[in-house]
Amino acid sequence: MTVTITPSPSPPSSTTYIRTLRILILCCIILFIMLYQQDISIAELYPYLHNQAYYLLNKHYSLNEQLLQKNCYYTTILSKHYHDTHDTITNVQHDISVLSSVKDITWKIIPDKQDPLLTPRLQLLLDGEHPLLSYNLLKTCLNNHHIVFIGDSLSRYQYLNLVYYFTYQTWYSSNPANEIEKQWGSWKSFYEEGTKRHNTKDSYEICDCYRNENTLDNLLENRYYINYQFNLRISYLQVFYTRPFQAHNLDWLNYYCDNNDINNPSICEQTGCIPGACNDPPDITLQPPEEVINYAINNLDPTIIIVNSGLWGSYAEDSNLREQLIRSSNTAMRNSQRPIQFYWKTTTARSNLPYTKQIITLDEYTSLIPVLTTVNSHNLHRWRLFDTFRLTSILNSLIFPSVTNDNTDNYNETDLKNNNIDQTIKEMYYWDDVHFQQPIYRGLNEILVLDIIRNCNEC
């Protein structure tokens, strides 16, 4: 029998060390030449290196959900990928716009990595990448947060999609869908039965809701959700900017149930009224938006506030509303018990008209940039602009394949609806002219949540 003895590897020679040192010195020289030519400081280069690190990791490793849960650092790089690039650092919009550094936005049907069966689904890609949310990261970085949506139905369905995700760790509810009210048969069923979905051993929702089936008289819808597992609150305050905001007393609704006993989850029951039957005279009547924002701050202790004018008004046209926006932010600075991050959500693209003709919505983003820049200069960058119109106008362009920027003036709305809509594509994205199917709300929420946790230092 022959015995082969494998010699132990010898330590690197001095020649190897010298060669490695020369390579490092050469790299440093090249790096400083690049900095000098591009006039980039070391501080500005740091985010760029973050992006390159993410690029290399994503190129050589499979960043699936399991890897993200094992190493929070990779997820931090992922979230920074959409906000820190070397060519936008000095751009004034960088501190304001959620999507300032994104070059390419695509909606594509790809295997869903959050689904054990990898079911192909429509998903949002930013610069070719699909944002992945790590359960462990969310549990850490959203701990003790309260996210408050203030707006109309465009925000309601985004709220419902987000709440369902935190209740069941999936974005997709079965028929009737959380985000499609008409599948429930009536507003009362939508409120009463829909609320029951969110009442589990780890979560519950109060729905201060009532709506006449035939008119818009005496309607109110305010939802308050808590998840014990994530130690997270999410709320929705219904605001139509042409109507007063109405609500009932939070104590009467049992809003504070188990508020101080997060480690002892139990099912809380709504008192005062049944969801869908809260037609008692309101205890609170306010004028939006400033009074509603102040109400949320004084009563809900929010850390995140998302506002939108939606289909009932626009900050793009009215200078008085812009002033209210500034006053609301200043008031929040004085009254809030802890820092608040504000988001202005632009109005999403409608499906019954090419986005190039939705002029008010097109102007909303550009008109708000200088306003929010002024506000942030005095308030420590507390406002960010969430341009959901940009995210959804891409879908709109697919619905109108024969319409271009150059020929929209040749069509009126009736012609466009009758002759130029790809109805199959429309039904894939929208369930009516203004509200979306579940995958779209998922995409909006993934981007929003990634932005919320972008500065989380708990990893």
Image (spheres, rainbow, N blue to C red):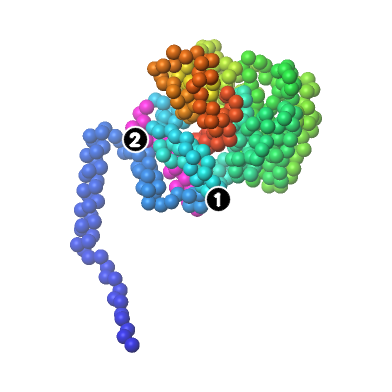
Residue wearing tag 1: 117
Q: Is residue 256 visible?
A: no
Sequence-earlier tag: 1 or 2: 2
Viewport quadrant of the N terminus: bottom left
Residue 295 as seen in the image, left or right of residue 97: right
Please tell me whether residue 192 belongs to the stretch shown in magenta. no
Disc 1 on helix, strand or loop? loop
Residue wearing tag 2: 86
Residue 199, given in percent of the width and then of the height, sits at 71, 40
Residue 99, given in percent of the width and then of the height, sits at 44, 31
Q: In which quarter of the view is residue 366 placed? A: top left
Q: Work out which residue is located at the far front of the displayed protein and give it.
A: 419
Tell me the residue at 51%/49% (across/down).
65
Relative to 305, is 45 above or below?
below
Dot 1, how many residues are within 10 Å of its Cα: few (below 14), some (14-19), or many (20+)?
A: few
Q: Which residues are magenta?
A: 70-91
Disc 2 on helix, strand or loop? loop
